[in-house]
Image: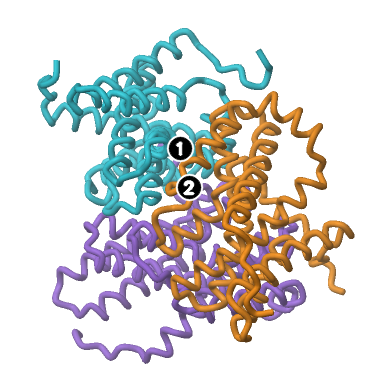
Chain colours: A cyan, B orange, C purple
Amino acid sequence: MKHLPIPHVSLIAIIEVVAILVGALSGFVEARRKRMDIVGVFTVAFIAAFGGGTLRDILLDKRPLFWVQHQEYAILIFVLALLATPLMKTVRQIISERVIVVADAIGLGLFAVAGVAQAQTAHMPIFIASMMGVITGIFGGVLRDIVCNEVPMVFRDGKPYAICAFFGAWLYIGLQYTDVSDDFALWTSAAFITILRLVTWKFDLHIHYHKNP
Amino acid sequence: MKHLPIPHVSLIAIIEVVAILVGALSGFVEARRKRMDIVGVFTVAFIAAFGGGTLRDILLDKRPLFWVQHQEYAILIFVLALLATPLMKTVRQIISERVIVVADAIGLGLFAVAGVAQAQTAHMPIFIASMMGVITGIFGGVLRDIVCNEVPMVFRDGKPYAICAFFGAWLYIGLQYTDVSDDFALWTSAAFITILRLVTWKFDLHIHYHKNP
Amino acid sequence: MKHLPIPHVSLIAIIEVVAILVGALSGFVEARRKRMDIVGVFTVAFIAAFGGGTLRDILLDKRPLFWVQHQEYAILIFVLALLATPLMKTVRQIISERVIVVADAIGLGLFAVAGVAQAQTAHMPIFIASMMGVITGIFGGVLRDIVCNEVPMVFRDGKPYAICAFFGAWLYIGLQYTDVSDDFALWTSAAFITILRLVTWKFDLHIHYHKNP
């Protein structure tokens, strides 16, 4: 059970690109809803895609930033922003909401767990590391909504999005105290977040917070 | 007068906890007013409590951040966020507005002067150091209001809040040119800010800015 | 053509002060429209003047920040904020919108090209360097609008402001592959941005983005 084969690096690269594209797509949609111009559409998409990881790296004082090392992602979002108006209609026709939610859930799992791992590499205490995982997963959307002059969706819709990332972060931290390999812990926790997110989405679960149980 | 006994370290720790709790409380209140869920309540409370010091440390490039070194404060706010709904009613019954204002004024004094001292340790020029003190004191509330999609209260209510911190920062800087001890300068300036804030609150003083006198 | 005389250093200093003042002025106007008090007026003006460069330096992890090294600029904005109410009326009478637009366009050119140069000094890849130039030129205004609880103007008015900075950034990058001197490349690109901005302003050009051509 310990030395599971690690998926080939190009699988990670594909997941990464898909997750970034889904983040950017959420930015395109929000920016266009606000009738933004091309500059706004690109910037908001960029912030939605990279904002969480960038905030985490600034808090950890880690450089270079992910998108600085991989300028091809910035260029990709730039090209997509130029094409966003005609593209959006096609994307909506081809790709159903279901596909977007699944891709987003995969991205949430991957980035949250990666955020925890990076925080631990930077010797953060574990509760802070779990917070850094959640920040990586959700602050792209938070910053997107702030720039678009909205109360961040993830803070008010009561859907367990950040909470899935939080539980998965702690699963990853917990698995480190067992004798499973770090790769296994990482992939299991990411998959756990993705599945938890999809299950709560499927059954439209909400956390009722304001009414006392 | 010069070698005043320094208050015991646990007094500072108590003031610190109280000031952080008051900051977090302002976040709880604002987040709930916006009907945020548990994720929003925790995040906004956290930002309100630590946003000012975090922004200062990012500007100064100082790491690790305060709340990273003391994860017990993050855990405390996390637990309080879980309890906030039932707690809020009790807090309101037990603790009057007066108590909150006093605690907040103590926190403002302490954090503003500490902010100046840290900026000076990082060799900032004095005007910038005074600004860093004010930023430490007020930007928790500013970032809280931005995340809650409001024009920051401290920028528009005309009450001398930042201004108290600013005068106290300069008192602290000024006292460094006399032969009083640094401890005395620090405590005197913090107390000055607290008292000035309470006096202006008591008499409901406003700075009339838009009408020329 | 290669060894053009570099304008005297005090010319740069004058342009710098004027560009900062114009940035601050945009903050004064916006803060007063929001009925902010003196604290808000100073802070928003400061953010409008220095926000773009500060964000760039945080992303590049470059310290000390420009305004920390030159506290005289912070003091200048502070004094102007104290005088802003009586000053504003006079400024409006003396200085026409035309003058402000010209000064702003000069500032945009200068700061965008300087932003590219600084990013290249920090070994950023070229697309990222061009983005850093645009960020330097526009994010003062973006952060100003976010603090004032508005959707950033530069993201929604369809006027080619960021786009002028972007083209000028690439002109500067392109000229580095020719045998012109770096000074010539820098001044030509800055002038190009300024002129492009003024031409598009003069003819009131807009980028129509939402309607397909």
Where in the figure is residue A149, as x and y percent of width and height?
58, 42
Q: Nearer the viewer, residue B141 or C8?
A: B141
Of the residues tagged 2 and 1, which is closer to the observer? 2
The disc label shown at residue C211, or none:
1
Residue at the image position 36 percent from the left and 73 percent from the top: C190
**Hey, which quadrant is residue B92 in on the image?**
top right
Q: Amino acid at mark 1?
A: Lys
> What label does residue B67 carry, if any?
2
Q: CA distance from mark 2 to mark 1?
A: 48 Å
Check the image and name the residue furthest to the top. Answer: A203
Left or right, A106 with reference to B43: left
Q: Is residue B210 visible?
A: yes
Q: Residue at x 26, y 55 (%)?
A: C127
Residue B208, image x and y in percent? 83, 66
Amino acid at circle 2: Trp
Quick one: SS at disc 1? Answer: loop
Quarter of the view holding residue B138: bottom right
